[in-house]
Amino acid sequence: MNHDDIVAGLVQELRRGNLILLVLNRLQKPMYGYNLVKELQAHDIPIEANTLYPLMRRLESQGLLTSEWETSEAKPRKYYKTTADGLIVLNKTTEQWKAFTQNVEKLLSEGENQND
Amino acid sequence: MTNDLIERYIYAATKRLPKKIRSDVSDELRTIIDDMLTERCANTTPQEKDIRIVLTELGTPQELYEQYNPDSDKCLIGSPYYSTYKYVLKIVLICTCAGITLAMIISTLVNALNGTETSYASSSVILLRDFFVNLFTSLPSAIVWAFAFVTILFAIFYHKNIKIDNTGNLDSLPSVPVKKEKISKVETIASIAITIAFLSVFLICPQVLCMITTKTNTFIPIFNLDTIHSTWYIIIMFGVLGIIRESVKLIEKRYNKKVMITSVITNVLSAVLAVIWLAGENILNSDFVNYTSELFADSDKISAIFANFHLFFMGCILLALAIDTLDAVVKTLKSQNKI
């Protein structure tokens, strides 16, 4: 049995759900896509540009992000920012996330003790 | 040259995207690639090698397209329709194959009876050859039609979100059928196959229903071919009613009110159609009537039967419809009082 493949798949699933939460959180101040990629990578959250850009576009179509082309700088860039709706979603989901991770951690540590 | 590679890459990734987001995505990709190159090469000018590495890191154009495509998670027929689609498609294809094969057997046999071959050995080889030629010319198009029809129907169901079963509500869950009220799947599929055979014979080759003259060894069609051809819509409606009736049986899998009501309604409509279709004056081939009245000139009774063959045929259809209706009603009523 190839454990590595299964683990890689599971980790990817775990990341995918949390990514939206992180994006909404980080974009409370306007940022362009590549900037966000670098910032997440700096916090040990690896993310591919080709995943993040389409994701931001989807969140924008849902009304959670808003975007604007900034042309005053040397390079034109598209800046994204979390909308008011995005903030409400972010706060509610963050609460859920905290409660959920607490419960998961509790169960996982109980499981570890059983193995001892 | 190097910029050309980037532009070709962006074009390949965006060419199939919806028009309204295409240029925006292109601009966005250009800035990502530029940012990645700047990071990689700092202040030096990027070489083609750098561009290749960055583009490889970004993924293939196809991968990018799938990520950006707003319809990427959509499909022609998705869950929960797919399993029903597969089930219905299987039955429809079985019925089509069986029906067409049956029709081709009838048509080949009748054509052979009309043939002039004298040697049995050679005629049986020709018979077999004709059968396979007929089969392989009509079967593929029939299968394609059946496949397309079912697929389009279910694609519409899926995209319009049309409900096709109501087991979501606990109260509407059907009770487990007891043995006597179950409808045999084989019988139902056979009925559909026979209906398709009937449709094919009447629509494609009504001339195979004929009588062979002993004198000139030619064949005389029983029905007036022009009338049959001009009443194609009645034949199709007749067939569709039969298929609807049997399909409801297949879906319900047991005798219940729904089966009873559809059987009664479709059978009454079929009976009306049969009367309209066969009661007309010109439905029989006049040559056939003349020939049989000559042939059975010594017996008025037999020649009367052939002269009114359409009414005899209509009687058979009406009798069959009546038996089917009675069967559905009696079995349903029995299953309602099964306690």
Image: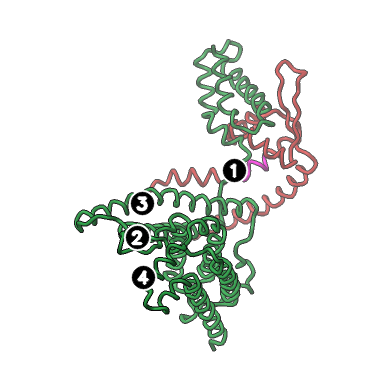
Front residue of B175/A38: it is B175
For the residues marked 4 and 3, what is the alpha-carbon distance in whole angstroms? 33 Å
Note whether residue A115 is visible: no
Mark in the foreground, 4 or 1: 4
Mark 4–mark 1 Cα distance, whole angstroms, equals: 85 Å
Give the crowd class for mark 4: few <14, some 14-19, many >=20 residues within 10 Å. some
Disc 3 target residue = B134
Tell me the kind of residue under disc 2.
Val
Identify the residue position indicated by label 1 in the image: A16
The label shown at residue B33 is none
Front disc: 4 or 2: 4
A108 in the magenta segment? no
Cβ–Cβ under 8 Å for marks 2 and 1? no
Q: N-terminal of the two: label 3 or label 2?
A: 2
Amino acid at pointer 3: Asn
Q: Give the range drawn in magenta.
A: A17-22
Chain identity for the colour green used in the image: B
Real-space CA distance between mark 4 and mark 2, rounded to the nearest whole angstrom: 21 Å
